[in-house]
Image: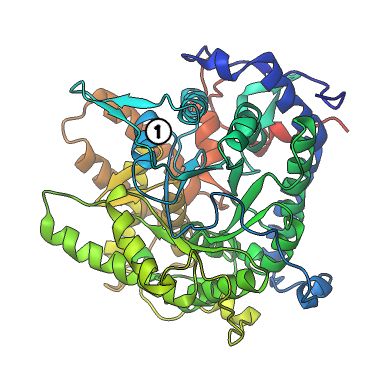
Amino acid sequence: MTSTIIRIPAVRGTEIPRGAEILTPEALAFIGALDGAFAGRRADVLAERRSRAKRISAGETPGFLGATRAVRSDTTWRVAPPAAGLIDRRVEITGPPTRKMTVNALNSGANVWMADFEDATSPTWTNIVSGQVNLFDALRGRINFVDEAGKDYKVGPDRPTIMVRPRGWHLCEKHLTIDGRPLPASLVDFGLYFFHNAHRLIELGAGPYFYLPKLETASEAALWNDVFELAQELLEIPVGTIRATVLIETLTAAFEMEEILYELRDHSAGLNAGRWDYIFSYIRTFAQRGPAFVLPDRSAITMTTPFMRAYTELLVATCHRRGAHAIGGMAAFVPERSDESATRTALLKVQSDKQREAADGFDGSWVAHPGLVEVARTAFDQALRGRPHQLDRQRPEVRVHAADLFATGAGTVTMAGLVTNVSVALQYLSAWVGGSGAVTIDHLMEDAATVEISRAQVWQWIRNSVQLADGQVVTAKLVRRLIDDEIATLNPTGTAELAGRLAAARDIFEYAALGETMPGFFTQYGYVKYLLEDPIRMRGPLGHEDLRMSERVPR
């Protein structure tokens, strides 16, 4: 390593089994180098996000950028060719890097596994460090899982390519600090995985590959590109060895897809239609712009909803024009052996969804459960007909205008939809504060993104005094009554441990859904108040500055 490394972070979290193998002085120094180089720019990015959000709330309308028109009109540039292990991506499975999920994902038969430190992981210190341990072991052929009955599950010879999704720019890791300032969580997740495994991945014939979440602009992609270049320089790895797929899951990023690919072109592995977060972003972006932007029940927002259809059409056309993979959205259904009828019905819906994506030109798609791998694979096999992808399929007929990305279409808000939002959020959050970030609820795999949709819809419906189909008006009083009912249903015997988690879930949900202003994310508040270890856990009322301590970077 070079003299770029200036500070070694202090470890404030408790000792985790085998954590010393991950939190070595050298690895911490590497993270310190990334922090020293980029923490200030990251703080600027977050400040600009807040400024832009205020401008949009005040009436500014997002659109395609005039300043970067030359990038979009230049027909000569392409992203780097697909890297080894990322040529055929027809089925990608996602999930947190727990020991069990790591084994199941590697045995799933998928082409790619996205090991998710973000929406599918409750970011406890134990989960973050043990997740790195599990990936370290997986790449060295020594991963296994022993269940409650003592059965030992090992990994077979045919394994998917691993991609890692670090936490987004907005999150911090308070168990690692420099001068008391928490480190950017994205640099911690990326840095630990890259430092320990980049050379090993190259030896295995692949490379360090990533998914980048929650980006809002091409300038944020440029920041990641600079992180990649420095990381490769520090470990003496050729530029372009890292590859990254960007999740287009914010409305502003949809207007800068081409620019995002351009900024990452030497490191690009395409774009993904992160549809759950995209719905949330639509609501959050226009939360204070009145009833014209109110969305119906979550279940009524499908991939054929006008603004969703326009967004995915634009994504495929953009990617293929630049030689990049276009990866489709999540199939969240979890098969249930005890309910064969419901499973058959759901699998038909998954099949239809994947067939539509393949017909639209996507090169692959996501599933949340190994039981969906074959359904998705069959749909893409039929479309690809022996090819590894369909990058050569151009979509010149696609013409998406700014107004198309705002078109909501028809739909109603119902009491059932409101109850579902409250119920799913409380069930998920009670599991999240207990350390689980991917939770099966009513045969669907829920993660942080679906809770964000639920709480944002509730906030928006209250703010606009939305009338339900039965004539009732959505108010904070009504929502609080539904919360009371749901908590009583979820814990009928008043079990103390569950009552504590539900109380925390209620607090987070009310903070995120019933406040005067809509917070950007529930995860920042929930993390600081409920997931931190003593003695650094923060108690009592929390202000904006309590959630932005990682942005206090010396200039």
Q: Is residue 448 above or below residue 216?
A: above
Classify residue 145 as left or right of residue 207. left
SS under mark 1: helix
**Residue 59 percent across, percent down from the top left:** 69, 71
Q: Is residue 275 above or below residue 522?
A: below
Residue at position x 43%, y 47% from top?
Answer: 94
Q: How is the image coloured?
A: rainbow
**Residue 541 percent across, percent down from the top left:** 56, 31
- Quarter that holds the N terminus: top right
For the question of whether residue 535 can be seen, the reply is no
Where residue 171 sits, quadrant-wise, is top right
Q: Residue furthest bottom?
A: 397
Q: How many marks?
A: 1
Classify residue 161 as left or right of residue 478. right
For the question of whether residue 269 can be seen, the reply is yes
Crowdedness of circle 1 by 10 Å Cα count: few (<14), some, many (20+)?
many
- Quarter that holds the C terminus: top right
Q: Nearer the viewer, residue 516 or 321?
A: 321
**Could you tell me the amino acid type at mark 1?**
Ala
**Residue 551 percent across, percent down from the top left:** 74, 36
Q: Nearer the viewer, residue 493 or 206?
A: 206
**Residue 339 percent across, percent down from the top left:** 12, 53
Q: Is residue 52 above or below residue 234?
A: below
Residue at position x 75%, y 62% from top?
Answer: 262
Q: Is residue 129 above or below residue 97?
A: above
Q: Nearer the viewer, residue 168 or 487?
A: 168
Residue linked to disc 1:
504
Q: Nearer the viewer, residue 217 or 51?
A: 217
Residue at position x 64%, y 22% from top?
Answer: 176
